[in-house]
Amino acid sequence: MREAAELTQPAPVELVPGRRGAPRHCGWCGRRLPEGGNVGRRRRYCGQSCRQRAYERRTALQRSGLPEDAVVLSDTEVAALQDRLFQLRCAAEDIVTAADDGADTRELRGLAAEIARAAKDLEQLR
């Protein structure tokens, strides 16, 4: 009888798909947030300082009239971003050139690792 009851019970359903296992990141600095328990609201920031910086940014945007999803970068940040994008493009062009020249798998793998590193660096905008 107990076996029949176990067979008829529905499997547990995850209410929000994709939330488990996916790493969460700080809404300000982008660092990975520690895994928390299942109680309460999920963390958005890694610490009080990031939370404060995000608050300051939101209030500054409200005063300036910019849209809330606006991203404001300084001249040096734009220049650094352009440099990193140029590095990524050069690394991609190196792979194309190496493939056209008949490079071996080991060399192509090394060049692909360089592209992956450059792309990972680009993910960190702040």
Image: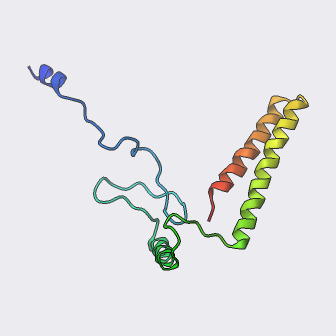
Rendered image quadrant of residue 78: bottom right
Q: Is residue 101 left or right of residue 13?
A: right
Nearer-the-camera pick, 125 or 48? 125
Task: Count every numbered label the image shows and give the total.
Answer: 0
Q: Is residue 75 left or right of residue 13?
A: right
Quick one: quadrant of the N terminus? top left
Q: Position of residue 55 (x, y in %)?
A: 45, 74
Rendered image quadrant of residue 124: bottom right
Nearer-the-camera pick, 55 or 108? 55
Residue at 46%, 54% in the rendered image: 24
Q: Is residue 21 left or right of residue 112?
A: left
Quick one: quadrant of the C terminus? bottom right
Nearer-the-camera pick, 111 or 101? 101
Q: Position of residue 125 (x, y in %)?
A: 63, 61
Residue at 17%, 28% in the rendered image: 9
Q: Position of residue 76 (x, y in %)?
A: 73, 71
Residue at 79%, 53% in the rendered image: 87
Residue at 37%, 41% in the rendered image: 17
Q: Is residue 8 visible?
A: yes
Q: Is residue 58 above or below residue 40?
A: below
